[in-house]
Amino acid sequence: MSASVASALLRFRGLVKTTASGKRLLDIAELAIPAGACILLSGRNGAGKTTLLKIIAGLDPPERASVEYDGAAAPWHEARRRYRRAVIYLHQQPYLFDCSVAANVGYGLRGNALGRAEIAARVEQALATSDLSHLATRNARELSGGERQRVALARALVLAPRLLLLDEPLANLDEEARARTCTLIAELKARGVAVVLTSHERLSLSALTHYHYELDDGRIALLPPSSDASTMDARGSVAAFDKASRRRGRAGRGTKTTVDDR
Amino acid sequence: MGDLGAAGKQAFALLFSGDPELWGIIGVSFRVSLLAVAIIAPIALIAAFALAYVRFPGRRPVVSTVHSLQAIPAVCVGLAVYLLLTRNGPLGDWRLLFTQSAMVIGQMVLGFPLLLALGHSALQAADRRAWETARTLGASPWRAMWTVMREVRFGLLAAVIAAFARVIAEVGASLMLGGNIDHVTRNIPTAIALETSRGEYAQGIALGLVLFVLALSLNFTLNLLHGKGEMR
């Protein structure tokens, strides 16, 4: 149920997250994100995919978690200070600030100690790479869904993150925008940027991803890399294994677990 | 009736001839109220942000209290601050009673809960993703706060204007704390309330018109801003 990856960019251990009502949403023994890896995170609606991404991003505090970044381990609250700048989270529907596209793309850069000219140059280049130059002066709120996502991606990539967390990047997009996004994910992969993305649709993304994790009942399981037909079988057996081990663990700890309520 | 007609004409004459007495009173009103709002605005808006975004024990009771305090009567604020500033009061040594400073303090106390409550409502309605996006793009908490405030700027501006409209039109606190002293603490509402009773109809009407037009245009601006806030 835990994935052991030798050298990880980020590694979470003993991650526990409880909902406001006291239900245990996530209980992850270990989650490793190797540098440059492209990871698909799947799971049912409400399985906690978004929450997990936000915890990884340093946005949403878990009850407990130890985080290893570049080899040094620390509790989440301390570790996130060090790694936050290396990790960027993108919402399922990206939020663009109420200003021009160029100002949106330059947002993160303006927090760094960069000169105006330097920022303008980098923004211009990022816009050109993402094919957004013609929209530079438009208010970001006036854009279409696909354009918004490209702006959000450009705004993230201009900061040269080491890990990008994409929440349902293919949802709510038309065919053309989906194709563009897939191409972009492939490019990120080629550039060595680690990506964790969530999706209901394994099929369209499994070709792009190195690893496939599945969230189920708060636990995470690494599914073996294989063709989609056999993945189905593997999924079944891993889930069965996980269920069995969970039952053992519960009996051993004697804790009251409410995950079955869902 | 003839008297009133004459007073009306005289009122317009006062307004448009630039009568120094009249415009002096208007000046006191604006100086005091603008200063009061300028002092409380940053504090109230940061507190409003904390109330909307920081989880702390007892947050809900604090929010309800703040929203209830909007209804505090001006004359009660006047009384409370009067008791603080009076010679024998705890702050009597400051010798502030019947000065513009006392009026500013009264209007600050009066405007603060209103600005805090309206600011909180505006920030509460802001999209959570704005904060998360700012933070994940590397913004410090202060910069992220500023970004969220920028996103709901129309709502926050509306809150500031509403607070200004409330304090510039109130009589109770200004009367008790300023004392309607000619050329010093006489502002529009106290002049209307007291000078009219002494038969100075023309001045009362002129000042009433100024306050009326001011209130109308502030409310008109508020409506425009609310429209703008909803559009986005």
Image (cartoon, coloured by chain):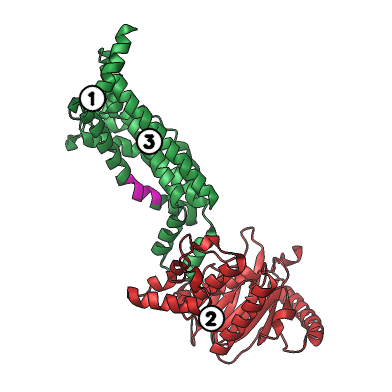
Seen from the viewer's position, the closer of residues B191 and B111 is B191
| Residues under numbered marks 1 and 3 in contact, where contact means CB atoms less than 8 Å apart | no
State the SS at label 1.
loop
Chain shown green: that is: B
For the question of whether residue A79 can be seen, the reply is no
Q: Name the residue under label 1.
A: B180
The x, y position of residue B89, in whole percent, is 24, 32
Location of residue A7 (image quadrant): bottom right
Tell which residue pokes out farthest to the top in this image: B2
Q: Mark 3 points at which residue?
A: B165
Residue at 33% over, 45% down:
B40
Residue at mark 1 to residue at mark 3: CA–CA distance:
20 Å
Q: Do labels 1 and 2 share a chain?
A: no
State the SS at label 2.
strand
Judge left or right: residue B161 versus residue A88.
Answer: left
- On what subunit does the disc labeled 3 rest? B
Residue type of the residue flagged with mark 1:
Asn
| Residues under numbered marks 1 and 2 in contact, where contact means CB atoms less than 8 Å apart | no
Judge left or right: residue A188 versus residue A122.
Answer: right
Q: Mark 2 points at which residue?
A: A163
Answer few, some or many: residues within 10 Å of disc 1's Cα (few below 14, many 20 plus, some between 14 and 19).
Answer: many
State the SS at label 3.
helix
Seen from the viewer's position, the closer of residues A152 and B171 is A152
Chain shown red: that is: A
Residue at 45% over, 40% down:
B222
For the question of whether residue A142 can be seen, the reply is yes
Up-down relation of residue B138 to residue B41 (above or below): below
Magenta stretch? B39-45
Residue type of the residue flagged with mark 3:
Ala
Location of residue B166 (image quadrant): top left
